[in-house]
Amino acid sequence: MSNTIGTHFKLTAYGESHGPAIGGVIDGCPSGIEIDRDFIASEMARRHEGAYATPRREPDEVEILSGVYEGRTLGTPIAFTIRNNDVNSDDYRELAGLYRPGHADYTYEQRYGLRDHRGGGRASGRITTSFVAAGAIAKMMLRNSGIKISATLQNCPVPPEGDSSGGIIECTVTGVPAGIGNPVFDKLNARLAAAMMSIPSAIGFEMGAGFEAAQMTGSQYRDEWDDGFSTKTNHCGGIQGGISNGMPIVFRVAFHPAVTINQPTECIDRNGQMHTLTPQGRHDRNHLPRTVVVVEAMAALTMADFMLDKV
Amino acid sequence: MSNTIGTHFKLTAYGESHGPAIGGVIDGCPSGIEIDRDFIASEMARRHEGAYATPRREPDEVEILSGVYEGRTLGTPIAFTIRNNDVNSDDYRELAGLYRPGHADYTYEQRYGLRDHRGGGRASGRITTSFVAAGAIAKMMLRNSGIKISATLQNCPVPPEGDSSGGIIECTVTGVPAGIGNPVFDKLNARLAAAMMSIPSAIGFEMGAGFEAAQMTGSQYRDEWDDGFSTKTNHCGGIQGGISNGMPIVFRVAFHPAVTINQPTECIDRNGQMHTLTPQGRHDRNHLPRTVVVVEAMAALTMADFMLDKV
Amino acid sequence: MSNTIGTHFKLTAYGESHGPAIGGVIDGCPSGIEIDRDFIASEMARRHEGAYATPRREPDEVEILSGVYEGRTLGTPIAFTIRNNDVNSDDYRELAGLYRPGHADYTYEQRYGLRDHRGGGRASGRITTSFVAAGAIAKMMLRNSGIKISATLQNCPVPPEGDSSGGIIECTVTGVPAGIGNPVFDKLNARLAAAMMSIPSAIGFEMGAGFEAAQMTGSQYRDEWDDGFSTKTNHCGGIQGGISNGMPIVFRVAFHPAVTINQPTECIDRNGQMHTLTPQGRHDRNHLPRTVVVVEAMAALTMADFMLDKV
Amino acid sequence: MSNTIGTHFKLTAYGESHGPAIGGVIDGCPSGIEIDRDFIASEMARRHEGAYATPRREPDEVEILSGVYEGRTLGTPIAFTIRNNDVNSDDYRELAGLYRPGHADYTYEQRYGLRDHRGGGRASGRITTSFVAAGAIAKMMLRNSGIKISATLQNCPVPPEGDSSGGIIECTVTGVPAGIGNPVFDKLNARLAAAMMSIPSAIGFEMGAGFEAAQMTGSQYRDEWDDGFSTKTNHCGGIQGGISNGMPIVFRVAFHPAVTINQPTECIDRNGQMHTLTPQGRHDRNHLPRTVVVVEAMAALTMADFMLDKV
């Protein structure tokens, strides 16, 4: 607990990498939203692209189990499920008693006393399939309000052979009216930060000028008024006092490189003994390209939640 | 809404800068915790030090209204209040219809339709008095578990005359056992990020290696095992998969410079007309030194909440 | 935990009977509501009337500490406090180590390990002062939507000398439009039930025909349509499937008699030893008359919460 | 919203009567609980017994999609799904534009603007399949703490041909230690009341002596101490001040008769026109016998939630 995000547009996510299915339930989506199943499929395809740690061939098909009738949302919970086909648990047998460096193997076992070690279990990057499916539905809702979300990969160094690389993703949300957000512990920027830090491998978050603002003076930083309540600069990233000001909302998320790499790996077992593991082709040189749509999805879920708070 | 943070150790904060009082209610603090009123006073004093936008002479005295009997917590809600003495609302009369650049004047009015413009109202840095008072109580609870929180100001350039500066505060939490935190939407790092972004002027957050991790390769980044489940490096900042790993928890928060500076200021009114305002000695060259204890307080509130989730 | 009720119009209550103060914080009250302090005072007076276990002479004055500026709500948290003047803790010295029959003395101490025994502490009927103060603010908000709440004492037998009596309070809410309520775990009737059972001494709740409906046949029970979506009868009490149907909302709450009576009382101590306590004039023959306004207050808080969910 | 119940052992339920599936996600179930699939099946069978409005032949098979590995819970969300096989939507075609008396047809459409009219949609009694499946898992958890839940049908008159009857179900929970429950807005009795009122057709709730207590005097009502902190009577139903006292927890729930009966029915359409509908064998003379296990399930979910709060 807790696998729920949002208070109005509320996603409860579930699933382990190699269990029967990944999925979620959205509670609070307004009634009457048209559900475009092709759009959901295209978002899932965006996530599926790129090199995978364990390339799966299944198309990650999203089945909707409730909450939609004759192509429109009912206002009741929207449950969806994505089957984990094409899984081979045998690949992970050697990992059963070992904690890999940089992974959540040790921490999950400290937290829960046991874990599903296959493919990272609940800590797997695969769980973001449910984020993307729910984000697609959030985007359909936001589209009706003229809100658009677009993320891009800013830098992402090419790693040496057998290694991986990190990177930074920038996201821009346009069309948000001024007045969205709730001080003092439900600020739009605070909630965006939490949503982004929920993405596996996220390690930093900044709004607008971000860490560079720490080097500025107040006269450089403060966004001076321009015409019609817009501002000449957007150092604050579109949010002041936790509330949107009508300018584009801009933030960046730093991701560390994938910790599963194609190199011999020193693992520790429950007794504190070291074991050298030689990976067999399961590596992910670059997980950033497919994380772009995940960033968008988490932004969409957050914005949908706040838009319903405003009405 | 919402002015509540936490789900187990839950603070509901209230108060405007120039209203009768600032304060809060803590619900969920365990019974039997000894309340050291001198410690609360010393934490308030740490916050009070340094140059203020509007130096107040009152000692920010915390009165406890409930939840404590014979020096110990009862397990019932702890209400506390800090009177706003020594306030002069006349200083702010000229600001009534104006939106200053960089402030939350415009956004609050878009959100609520009206606002208390005096001293920033609920958007004032003064509201952090309630964070510090509650944080002091959280620290007393954490002390019993051997958890210590310490923040330091990393850089903070001296601004030119009449201007202000930003800076970065680093915070370290020691004594946290492995296994604290809840995937996937209640991660310890995500909740720390949200807590920090709730502090006025916060604009960036990073764990461990943070944004630098985006430039690393996986072989550089991943923290290799050392003796006894500790790691040789701490690039992840003590959290993996949203759960503590027993290493020190380390994060940094970037703050933008104060937007109230001692220079002529172009304000906009509700009709879109510009007005030049000349500030009269109300400026805050550097709010960072007193923010250090606020960062600690928000970290303490977050950690107290998670420690109660684990039991 | 938890001393918070509501998710949109959210009251966090605090205070022990003989501590410094009783009070609460309302988070989520919309901005711009006119606050009539005379109305709050008159509601407090309604509660104060009748015979008290320990008659207090103070007028239970409500001080508002935040969230109101120039007579209107700001949309920020409304904190209020009611001082416990005129308390004499010495009266309760003999109760310190004893558990009275029928009271929450034993259960509180099992829950928290210690308690404030003076006047019942947090379990005292006195805490309903905060419910009534908050309810008065909720009523002001509802008044703008044309919603009216009215409770009456249905029966309340006169008890023999030195004894107390229970009773039933019926409450009617008019002006609620059809379509208010949220299936399946946030039903309007379920939330009303929980709100009413939160009142000290409440022991039963029923909507409309209530327990008598268990004896009816379907053809007797079901409310047949009349003109304009109204119904000929109102056996369901104005709610179907957890959602209001536009008819008056009608429910009844059963209260057990006060357990503090003017008779010798067998108390048990922590070691299981019995002690006979002879009460000295502290009895409450009939707490029902002053509970009427408490029922209205809890109904108002519940309705305010749902009305904000609908908008 | 909201289809979630509980804060620690948290069930999010979904599904319409004639959509693809009914189900839920349990978040917060501790790790290491043994899952007995035969027990889940036997609880589903208890619910399935008796006469149905629309007898379905499928065995209501529960598929677990996540959160269980090698027969034990992982501490991660447990998603389960129950397919709606054997549904014939054609049976309901004539109901599309009509609101039946006593049903939630009109209220759902007022709430959401549209609805899935087939078989009652989300307001159908069929949704209690998800309550029973989740309740079975809660019972497995409670069994480890020695807590047992048992409900019985108290009265349930035999209705005349073509009609239905209501009834009262009494539930007893044994093995609950003293000290479970949270004043003042999270009382065990208040939460039981809300859980019971969430069951379709519930119309009244009472603890212990219930409505009869309103006729008692204090000297009759108050439960006098017996040996070892037990009491001679149990008029309070095992809860004082919202907290369990170690005695059996006893409550009763009144249910109104089913409103679908085998008689001509005056329905109203959206324009206010009346239409006489002649039902064709779809009636449910007595839904009470199968509601017994639903009452137990809701009690189990509530108790599981509180037991996790106490640890």
Image (cartoon, coloured by chain):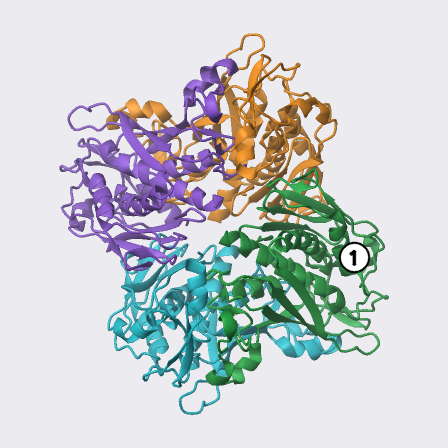
Chain colours: A orange, B purple, C cyan, D green
The residue drawn where x is 24% and y is 27% is: B165
User: Can you tell which quarter of the image residue D191 is in?
Assistant: bottom right
User: Can you tell which quarter of the image residue A247 is in?
Assistant: top left
Q: Residue furthest top?
A: A161
Q: Nearer the viewer, residue D273 or B20?
A: B20
- In the picture shown, does residue D95 fall above or below B87? below
Mark 1, other Cα within 10 Å: few <14 / some 14–19 / many ≥20: some
Is residue C160 shown left or right of residue D274? left
- In the picture shown, does residue C17 fall above or below B242? below
The residue drawn where x is 44% and y is 85% is: C164
Q: Nearer the viewer, residue D226 or D45?
A: D226
Q: Which residue is mark 1?
A: D45
Is residue B271 shown left or right of residue D78? left
- In the picture shown, does residue A35 fall above or below B2? above
The percent coordinates of residue B286 (x first, y second) are: 21, 31
The percent coordinates of residue B196 (x first, y second) are: 37, 36
Q: Amino acid at mark 1?
A: Ala
Task: Kindly state the secondary structure of the residue where label 1 is placed.
Answer: helix
Is residue D267 shown left or right of residue C107? right
The residue drawn where x is 38% and y is 85% is: C262
Q: Chain of mark 1?
A: D
The percent coordinates of residue B266 (x first, y second) are: 24, 33
The percent coordinates of residue B8 (x first, y second) are: 44, 49
Q: Residue furthest bottom?
A: C160
Whether residue C297 is visible here, answered yes or no, is yes
Q: Nearer the viewer, residue D133 or A117?
A: A117
